[in-house]
Amino acid sequence: MTSFETAPGQAPPPDAVHPRDSSPDTPTSVSRLNETIRGFISSWGSVWVEGEITAWNLRGGHVFGRLKDASGDAMISFRLWSSTLQRLPDDLKVGDRVVACVKSDYFVKTGDFSFTVSAMRHVGLGDQLERLERLRATLRAEGLFDPARKKRLPFLPHVIGLITGERSDAEKDVHRNAELRWPQVRFRTIHAAVQGDRCVPETLAALAQLDADPEVDVIVIARGGGDPQTLLGFSDERLLRAVAAASTPIVSAIGHENDHPLLDDVADLRASTPTDAAKKVVPDVAEQRALVQQLRSRARMRLTQRISHDVAQLEQLRTRPVLRAPEGMLTARAQELWTLTSRGRDLVTRRIDTAERTTAQLRASLRALSPGATLARGYAIAHLDGGVIVRDAAQAPAGSAVVVTVADGSFAARSEGPVAETDA
C-alpha cells in the first residue's frame, strides 16, 4: 500500500488499520500504521499553548525548536515554516515566554511526531506582571523582604562566591572592579545559565555548593541587563526561597539600574550592576589606606594637642608663687601664726589681769563683810555651851560659862549677869 497525504480535518482513510485486522499471521505494514496514525492526528484541531522557548534553531529559513511548560515537567517540539516566521515578531528567542497556536503533525516516513506553529507572540507583559505581583505579595507577607532578616556583609571577605554566565561581561566586571579595589581578593566562581530553562536549576545547584563552602563569606549572583522575559528566572519562587534560606550573605547584581527582578528584594543586598556589586562587596584599599592615614593624623593631632595642653597647664602651675617659692607660703603662715600667738598671749594676759583685779575687789568686799573684820575692830562674840551665840544679856545670867571669841582667838569667861546701861 502506498502512502498518501491527508488534508487537515479529513477523517482517516477507510482502509485504516484496526487492531482486529492484524495478527501474527496477517500483520499490517509500517506505512499503513503510520498512515492510520497520521489520519487520526490530522483530525485534531489547532490549540493555543503557553510555554517558554528552550530551543530555537534556524535551518533553511525554517525554525525548529522546543517549548517547555511553566511547571518544567513537559515539553514539545515544534517547527515554524519560513512563511509563518515572516509574520511573527523578530525578537523571539530562547528564554522568551510565549503563547503559540500549534497543530499536531505526524511524519509518515520517519514516524516522528511534532507540532506546526501557525502563530506565536510574547506572553502579555500584564500577565507576567500580575504573576510577579502575586508572588511578591506572598513573599512579603511571609517576611522574606523584611530588612530585619537580612544578613550583614563582611567588611573584607576572604573568598567571594560568584554565580554568573560563563565568559560573560558580568563576570569580567566583577573580577576587574574587585581586583582594582583589593588586589588580593579571591573568587570561587561557578558558571550557570543566566536565562532559559537551565537558569534556575543551575543557579540553585551553584548556590547550594557555595553556601556549603565554609571559606565563602559572601555570594554574588550576577548577569548583564536584559528584557523582562530573559530575567524571569531570577524571579522564580524556587530560587527566591533558596536565597532566603541560605546561611551566607547574598548579593543580587542582576541587570542594570532599571532592572528589578524579585531576587533583588529577597537578597541581603541589591547591587544595581555587577560593577556596583564589586564596589559594595570589596572595600577600596586606597580608600582604606587614606582612612587609616587620616585616623592616624587625627589621633596624632589630638595626642599632640592634649600633651601641649597638659604641658601648658603644668607650666602655669609651676609659675604660681606657691610653687615658685614654696618657703614664702611657710614664712607667711609663720608670721600669721606668730601674730595670732602674740594676740592670744596678750588676750590671755589681759584676761588674767582683769580676773586678778576682780578677785581682789571681791576679796576686799568679802573681807569687809566678814565677821573677822568686825572682830578686828575690837568686837567679840560670846558663845554658850553648845555654840549658841549670846545675843541678849539675859541669855548669860551671872555665873554662866561663856566663850569669848576675839580677832586673834578665844578665851573662857564667866558671866556676872546683866550690867545696867550707862550713858556714854
Image: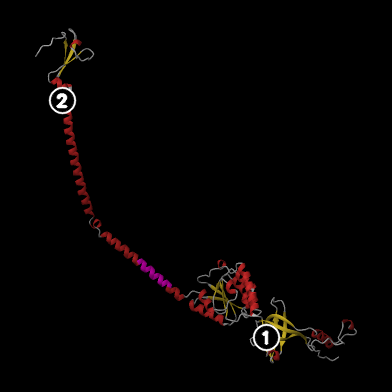
Labels 2 and 1 touching (C-beta < 8 A): no
Q: Residues within 10 Å of mark 1 (few under 14, many from 20)?
A: some
Q: CA distance from mark 2 to mark 1?
A: 153 Å
**Quadrant location of residue 73?**
bottom right
User: Which element is circle 1 on?
Assistant: strand
Outermost residue, left side: 424
Residue 402 located within the stretch drawn in magenta: no
- The kind of residue tagged 1 is Trp
Q: How is the image coloured?
A: secondary structure
Which residue was labeled with disc 2? 368
Where is residue 87 shown, x and y percent of the image?
68, 89
Q: Residue at x 89, y 83 (%)?
A: 21
> With respect to residue 217, does 58 lie above or below?
below
Residue 301 located within the stretch drawn in magenta: yes
Kindly tell me whether residue 212 is visible in this rendering.
no
Closer to the camera, 204 or 396?
396
**Quadrant location of residue 223?**
bottom right
> With respect to residue 82, does 122 lie above or below?
above
Closer to the chain start, of discs 2 and 1, is 1
The magenta stretch is 291-303
Closer to the camera, 216 or 227?
227
Which residue was labeled with disc 1? 56
- The kind of residue tagged 2 is Ala
Q: Which quadrant of the figure contains the N terminus?
A: bottom right
Q: Residue at x 61, y 76 (%)?
A: 234
In the rendered structure, the answer to whether residue 364 lies left or right of residue 20 reads left
In this rendering, the count of numbered labels is 2
> With respect to residue 412, does 99 lie above or below?
below
Outermost residue, top side: 399
User: Which element is circle 2 on?
Assistant: helix
